[in-house]
Amino acid sequence: MLIEALSVIPEIFSPYLDASIMGRAQKSGVFEFAAHDLRNWTHDRHRTVDDAPFGGGPGMLMKPAPIFEALDDICSRGPMPHVVFFSPCGARFDQRHAERLATKERILCVCGRYEGIDERVYTLADDVFSIGDYVLTGGELAALVLIDSVVRLLPGALGDEASSVDESFSLESGLLEYAQYTRPSEYRGMGVPEVLLSGDHGRVDEWRRRNAIERTARWRPDLLDQADLDSDEWAFARSILRGELSD
Ligand code: SAM
């Protein structure tokens, strides 16, 4: 997969994407990354990318021309990318979106700054995503969030192929992930569930499934409708929702 970003701060991406799992995934060819400086598609001495909004109001907006010209140019090089914009007004980005994007050959992330972008530019978007109900200073962090969540789904990105299947929100279960523990089995007076030390994989799987349902019912009951629960599991989830098993 080729992932690109268009930004006025292209240097912001490499400290994160060259480190750890993302860095190894690039080195081993799981994905390639390129950042483009939007100012390369300006034509004035000051390399201006913003202008005042029509109708007045605070701050500056990103002008349409540099973004349109950049996309004409970038998209003409190789296969047509899936073009993603970021905005607090976009669809809330989630794991289903990440799973859909992980099937694309090429993704181009267009990062807004200032007070936002001239609305006409969104005609270029295949997706517009928000990463949450708060306002960031720019789309670069949102792009990094998207890139990380997509790359870890690509074959070979994680050491253990199973590890992205089992996680919270995965299509497999639609539930939050179960609680996990590591050594020592006793720490500051806190133990771990005995079943996890039993070596009985059947019981461990059962406990994990039930624990995932319990945590989802407690913390994200909105996810339960999309989860694949049988009637006993629904009864258990409802007992949590009614507070019957509260600690
Ligand atoms: N004036 C805009 C509004 O109220 O919706 C906010 C603009 S914000 C300061 C500048 C840029 O940051 C946006 O164009 C977008 O690219 C990015 N951004 C800010 N918050 C975001 C969020 N929650 N999710 C995704 N991108 C965001």
Image (cartoon, grey):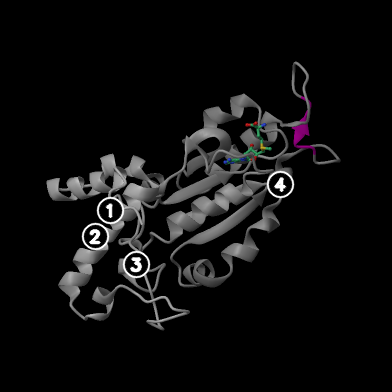
Disc 1 designates what residue? 213
Question: Relative to residue 78, is residue 194 depicted above or below?
Answer: below
Residue 4 falls left or right of residue 223: right
Please report whichever mark, 4 or 1, sits nearer to the chain's N-terminal start: 4
- The x and y percentages for residue 79 are 45, 47
In the rendered image, the quadrant that contains the N terminus is bottom left
| Disc marking residue 209 | 2
In the rendered image, the quadrant that contains the C terminus is bottom left
Between the C-alphas of marks 1 and 3, the distance is 19 Å
Badge 4 crowding class, 10 Å Cα cut-off, few under 14, some 14 to 19, many 20 or more, is: many
Question: Looking at the image, can residue 1 be seen?
Answer: no
Q: State yes or no: discs 3 and 2 in contact (Cβ < 8 Å).
A: no
Please report whichever mark, 1 or 3, sits nearer to the chain's N-terminal start: 3
Disc 4 designates what residue? 8
Which is more foreground, mark 4 or mark 1? 1
Between the C-alphas of marks 4 and 3, the distance is 35 Å
Give the magenta range.
48-52
Q: Is residue 44 magenta?
A: no
* Residue at position x 85%, y 41% in the image: 46
Element under label 3?
helix
Q: State yes or no: discs 1 and 2 in contact (Cβ < 8 Å).
A: yes
Label 2 near ligand 1 (CB < 8 Å) = no
Look at label 1 and name its amino acid. Answer: Ile
Disc 3 designates what residue? 163
Please report whichever mark, 4 or 2, sits nearer to the chain's N-terminal start: 4
Look at label 3 and name its amino acid. Answer: Ser
Labels in figure, total: 4
Magenta span: predominant SS is loop
Which is more foreground, mark 1 or mark 3? 1
Look at label 4 and name its amino acid. Answer: Val
